[in-house]
Amino acid sequence: FSSRRRHTRCSRDWSSDVCSSDLSKTNNIVLVGSSHVGQVNTTTINRQVNTQLSKSYTVYNLGISADNPSKRVNQVDQIISMKPKVVFYGISYYDFPAVPEKDHLLIKITKVLSDTINGGKEFDNPQLFTRHYTVPLKVERKTSPVFHMDCLSVPDTPFDKACPKNKNPKTSDELKKQPNPVWINDLSQERMNDLSKIIKKFDSNGVKIVLFITPVHKIYIERLSDFQKKSFDDIIKNLSEKYGVKIYDFRNKYDDIPIWSDTSHIIQTDETAYDKDIVKMIVEELN
């Protein structure tokens, strides 16, 4: 990754004194979503997009670890102020966790933990939450709640960091030994409603929004229940039919490529097949 800095450090609340990039340019492209979006190489994407298009664009990657529509809905006005040509929103199963009725008792556990450990603040990624509270005290948590050493600030990616030295490709056998992240809550409808608000607000402000389903390994999908698979597929179908948004699907595209750090995260490197597909998507939507 390039070590150059083209913007100052941004805080997640987007306060004006810390997010001071030149966002008045009219050729901005914005990627939003969770760490599944934050992990793409924005430097490579910017270079390739501008090579393939006649205009000069700046792609900003606003991916945030553990993000979801109910968190992102609060940033829509700030993103609109960037005057983006297109907003590409990456979503996955985590964004709309579907829990069968028989599993609802598990939700009470997360409520107890959030009340006793997290000051009452909701957390819906127990794995990420646990890692955050079990890291050594000497580690500066502000770098990342999961990956702490050898992390790099990537240009045009203010909310996420690249930690390439910490993550080595896992073989299929190694991936099979890893547990899937467990998303435990019943907020699927709430998040669906918030994503609807996001889509409608971008549309009413003349900002084109495109959705893409972020990569997950086939091992991840095989471990989902039929209920979870159907719930997510129904959401995707509903979004396409109700709002007419275009949806790119990157699931299962990279199963045989050694680029996985776990069953839902691709390793950040100089360039991956995922990066190339992001470029293709951007170029297609801007041509």
Image (spheres, rainbow, N blue to C red):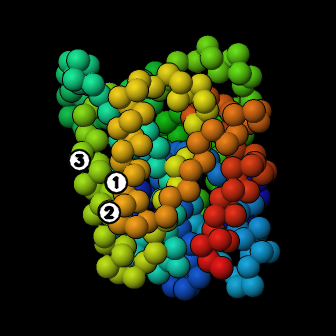
The answer to which of marks 3 and 2 sits earlier in the sequence is: 3
Q: What residue type is labelled 3?
A: Glu
Q: Disc 2 vs disc 1: Cβ atoms closer than 8 Å?
A: yes
Residue for point 56% across, 85% down: 25
Which of the image's four quarters has the C terminus?
Answer: bottom right
Q: Position of residue 146 (x, y in %)?
A: 53, 33
Q: Which mark is residue 242?
A: 2
Q: In this view, does 148 lie to the left or right of 73?
A: right
Residue bearing the label numbered 1: 238
The amino acid beneath tag 1 is Asn
Give the class, few, some or many, for how many residues have Cα within 10 Å of label 3's Cα (few <14, many ≥20).
Answer: few
Q: In this view, does 183 lie above or below 143?
A: above
**Label 3, label 1: how far apart the Cα atoms are:** 15 Å
Left or right: residue 196 compared with residue 264: left
- Write down the residue under mark 3: 190
Q: Nearer the viewer, residue 190 or 77?
A: 190
Mark 3–mark 2 Cα distance, whole angstroms, equals 17 Å
